[in-house]
Image (cartoon, coloured by chain):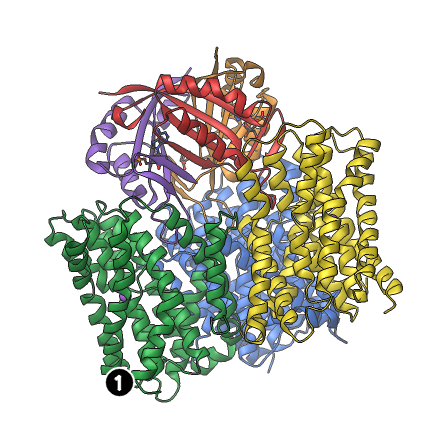
Chain colours: A green, B purple, C orange, D red, E yellow, F blue
């Protein structure tokens, strides 16, 4: 107990409350507000840090690694799903897209864990996070097309949704503003983006616990044991690739751990919305439940400490 | 004096609402109204909003239209909605100012 | 056994909702219900809520009333709403307990 | 071709919504939709949501069902709702795909 | 004026604005967000404090006293209502339940007043607060049953509502997390739970002022003068019992004052919702108006300073 | 770029995102929450400052100047609109009312800019801000009446809306509370009203950018080039009057700049709501678009720095 980070305890509280069918609830508008705050704060903090001398060093290889991971991870995910579970093609492609993309809150929890262990990630990682959100969606669409899905009709709408997704725009925009603003931004915004960060993260993880457990209870019959196993093994596989990529791009131990967190995490905001439009035949009950109610809790509770330990060993902190 | 019209009521995924109103526009409807939905159950199971992606949100689209427009909408709906979560119902109503409703 | 009533449905600007329900009250309606609206399109163009002043918000007012009350409401509406953004439609419905609906 | 159905509309306290949908399920309805309500007036006076306990919140439950199901619902409602704040009305509507509506 | 606490001034502002029919309004989602914040912050702060050496000393007698008060206070309340007002049985039982239970915001305002006077309550009082929320509901149901009310049909649903009420879960959960986290939690969360507390309390009391005055204007005819008198005397009676209980449990002057605040306060979130389900025949217009629009303002404006003065005299600060 | 204030960068981010049709969105309840916070914080900070020795010096002339500006500015605005654009009378009167009144967020952005340049405005300016909200509405109604508009039927309702407008009540109320509370209020509330101010302002301006660009895209055909020109020149004219008024009332350079910001800004919350009730024939598409999507961005991006430079020159800082 001593070692479990505070935000994770709030996640557990929410999860337990919802499993026990408590009526504890976070209003939708608050969930959205908290997630806007987290994206803004992560972006601005990263931008401020990268503006410091030497802050951008090593950005390019990491960015490239992130883009590649996002593009490529859906492929083994799709193969595994089609090979080992009875999932239909569009749903398998949609699920695969979630695992190539990333989860902002898993990253935030990862940052908190990395900092609690006395390490720091490279300041440019929020940019890598933003870069990893979308490529996986394109791969998922290609996989589904190959699988025979009709081309989506509303192509411009979809492209907009994919490329100008709100979380990417806010994350990257805040990052740029922090970068441009530098110390000015730090002076003006630090009580907001630093002081409140942990508290907001706790409240948000409480909400995620509630949502995850409620999603688990509403899980469709389609969600059988093999899918759950996928939802537990795929993050390990992704995180493994992330570790390797982090080491190859020459990141610090904290950075390697966060790269593993990114690659091991699955999207539950940007990608579901895009998939609902692009692949309407895919079952949202499957992909939302897997990413929100299986993989997210796994990463927050077990994955992150594991990836951190491995990163410390391998990158020799 | 009142004029007979059709009242079309469509419950559909929120992410697809714009496609439905585009359809109504292209069928010649003079207007429509979108109402929020808290939760719903149907063939595809329970749909309760509030997930962060909005994927399980429904909306209700209401459209008052002439019989001719209503028929076009009903004819086109299969292609648009097909097997996706959605229901469509039609009933009779009356309006005062006919010029407001195509 | 059920009793026939009229179902009046009014989409109107949120800032004007209270005037509409005052009208319903004064026409003798036994009750009404106000529902929120996300967005709407009509003669006066697109109306999508969410501006800080609430000027583009619509609501839907639903009132189940006797034929006599409904006629009074329809007669009075022109004066109240005139050219402003609003639609009114009426349809038939049935209720069980007649005493609940004037 | 369309098929005749009944459109049941129930305004009820939000805290009692789940009991109403349970009733609809047990009467064999194939689905239902719950809409939020801003405010309402009826026999029991004004009900405006927004209190912290949600005690004065109403919702509107919409259910499209066969005549047989509708009759069961109307028969059962008295027991469920009795004297509590609630109204129920029924009207006719038509649907395209009969298999979607029990 | 000099002596009125700032949050109380915001309550007065909201109350006056709503009486004058200003359109000032706080969105529902914000009210709920603020109340979630207050429960989380009260819980975490209490938990952190109890984790300090000696922090749990004296917990048991106070907890017991709180439980007893919550169980028993509805009985004299019910008797008084039935004896002096024409209230029907279910409504009288429901009202009685509100007065045995507690109000989180009254407690928060009490804490602010206690601290402003240079005292402190025992750190475990948030746990007592959580423990006092539910027992009164059970007593109310027994009183109503005795009065002939039919047993509620949806028993499991009701039990859940009563025992796993959101505010109890969040308050107790945050308390435990603060306790487990100790200094770690303090370091991570103090800007959030300490820095913002007074500001959030002000905003929330502004909203409570608006709600109370609006509820007063919408008061049902059933709310006659005798009921208003009950709404003013019952908190005094409850607070008297709370003072005695606090002294008997050996609390400090600040703790005695807060025990009086708890016993004198009436629930307006958890209990109304439970009563609406369990005693549908009871008139919510009566119990919400009494607790929110009569007793709450009375406590915030006059009750708390009075209880505090008495506690200082009796417990000899 | 170096010199653009951080909050303005967030405005630009929101504006660009909405123009590019990103789905980035701020929930309504959050917008309203942020605007409540800004009014409370501006009021409280002003009140605390005015409570300091000498804080109220010079209040009266500035208040008078503000009232006059609000009453009178709609007249030239109406004349210009009727003379140079084809706008119908009620709409012209309604638009004119917006430009006599003020915008709280423009003022907040102005404060941030003034402070960033090392100056300070007089502490009583929030009271001037509150005083300037309503007079312009009365002038607009008189102009419309003269123009033949029927007297609004629901007179009491309208008067309430105008005089007890939520933002005036909260701003003035918070100002009074800060004044009464003085150093007590400062101690209790400063992390809330100071620490978060810049961060909240950034988030709010992000939202304003989104709203402004979306409003611009939904602009009615009625909004032709001549109206846009009015929306760019009228703030300059207003700000010029504000500069003069500030100098005549003997304000400091920072105060003169803020007086120009007030006079140059146009309301987009209080006045539109009042106009919709009072002048239903006026086209809300015109006045909301002009004030929110033309004048607000102009002031935030170009106007404020210009007014500040002029004030520094003229008041000789
Ligand atoms: N019989 C019904 N009555 C009212 N609403 C329905 C009914 N069936 C389905 N719905 C609504 O339509 C949505 C999609 O239905 P479905 O496509 O059957 O899953 C559901 O989530 C409900 O909100
Ligand atoms: N044909 C229609 N069907 C449904 N709703 C409509 C229709 N026409 C208008 N409305 C609604 O009524 C509002 C005002 O309409 P209008 O006065 O025509 O601009 C619109 O914003 C819509 O919400
Ligand atoms: N005649 C009516 N038309 C529309 N809605 C009504 C009517 N009567 C009652 N209601 C709604 O039903 C709720 C409960 O009504 P009641 O049981 O009569 O108090 C009210 O709060 C209204 O929202
Ligand atoms: Na991933
Ligand atoms: Na009590
Ligand atoms: Na102005």
Q: Is residue C19 something one can see in this rendering?
A: yes
Image position, residue E57 (x, y; %): 71, 69
Residue at the limit of the structure toward the top, as seen here: C1
Q: Is residue D83 left or right of residue A98?
A: right
Residue depicted at 66% across the width and 42% down the height:
E137
Image position, residue C3 (x, y; %): 49, 12
Closest to the observer, B26 or E172: E172
| Quadrant of the image containing the N terminus of chain F | bottom left
Q: Is disc 1's CB within 8 Å of ligand 4? A: no
Q: Is residue A219 above or below residue F119?
A: above
Residue depicted at 40% across the width and 52% down the height:
F215
Q: Which residue is mark 1?
A: A250
Image position, residue D78 (x, y; %): 53, 20
Image position, residue A290 (x, y; %): 31, 55
Q: Quadrant of ligand 1?
A: top left
Parent chain of label 1: A
Q: Is residue A26 above or below residue C21?
A: below
Q: Is residue A315 above or below residue E59?
A: below
Q: How many numbered marks appear?
A: 1
Q: Is residue A124 something one can see in this rendering?
A: no
Closest to the observer, B74 or F16: B74
Q: Residues within 10 Å of mark 1 (few under 14, many from 20)?
A: some
Name the element at disc 1. Answer: loop
Q: Is residue A69 above or below residue A24?
A: below
**Quarter of the view holding residue F147:** top right
Residue depicted at 44% across the width and 31% down the height:
D22
| Quadrant of the image containing the C terminus of chain F | bottom right
Residue at the limit of the structure toward the bottom, as seen here: A53
Closest to the observer, F257 or F83: F257
């Amino acid at each position: 107990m001593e070692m479990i980070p505070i935000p994770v305890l709030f996640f557990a509280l929410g999860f337990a409350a919802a499993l026990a069918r408590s009526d504890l609830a976070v209003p939708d508008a608050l969930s959205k507000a908290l997630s806007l705050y987290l994206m803004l704060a992560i972006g601005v903090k990263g931008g401020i840090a990268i503006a410091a001398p030497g802050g951008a060093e090593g950005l390019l290889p990491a960015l490239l690694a992130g883009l590649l991971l996002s593009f490529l991870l859906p492929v083994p995910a799709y193969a595994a799903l089609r090979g080992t579970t009875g999932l239909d093609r569009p749903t398998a492609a949609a699920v695969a897209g979630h695992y190539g993309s990333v989860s902002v809150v898993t990253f935030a929890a990862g940052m908190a864990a990395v900092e609690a262990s006395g390490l720091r990630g490279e300041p440019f990682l929020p940019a890598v996070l933003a870069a990893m959100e979308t490529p996986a969606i394109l791969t998922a669409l290609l996989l589904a097309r190959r699988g025979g899905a009709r081309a989506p009709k509303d192509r411009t709408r979809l492209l907009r949704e994919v490329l100008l997704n709100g979380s990417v725009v806010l994350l990257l925009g805040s990052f740029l503003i922090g970068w441009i603003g530098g110390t000015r931004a730090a002076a003006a915004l630090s009580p907001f983006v630093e002081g409140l960060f942990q508290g907001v993260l706790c409240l948000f993880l409480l909400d995620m616990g509630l949502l995850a457990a409620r999603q688990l209870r509403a899980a469709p019959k389609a969600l059988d044991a093999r899918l759950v196993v996928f939802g537990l093994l795929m993050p390990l596989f992704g995180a493994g690739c992330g570790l390797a990529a982090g080491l190859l791009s020459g990141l610090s131990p904290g950075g390697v751990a966060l790269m593993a967190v990114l690659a091991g995490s699955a999207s539950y905001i940007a990608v579901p919305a895009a998939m609902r439009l692009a692949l309407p035949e895919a079952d949202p009950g499957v992909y939302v439940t897997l990413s929100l109610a299986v993989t997210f809790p796994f990463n927050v509770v077990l994955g992150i400490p594991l990836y951190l330990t491995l990163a410390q060993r391998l990158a020799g902190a | 004096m009142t004029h007979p019209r059709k009242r079309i009521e469509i419950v559909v995924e929120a992410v697809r609402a714009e496609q439905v109103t585009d359809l109504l526009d292209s069928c010649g409807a003079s207007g429509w109204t979108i109402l929020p939905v808290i939760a719903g159950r149907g063939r595809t199971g329970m749909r309760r909003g509030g997930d962060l992606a909005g994927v399980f949100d429904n909306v209700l689209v209401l459209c008052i239209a002439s019989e001719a427009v209503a028929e076009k909408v009903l004819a086109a709906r299969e292609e648009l909605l097909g097997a996706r979560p959605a229901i469509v119902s039609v009933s009779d109503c009356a309006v005062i100012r006919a010029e407001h409703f195509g």
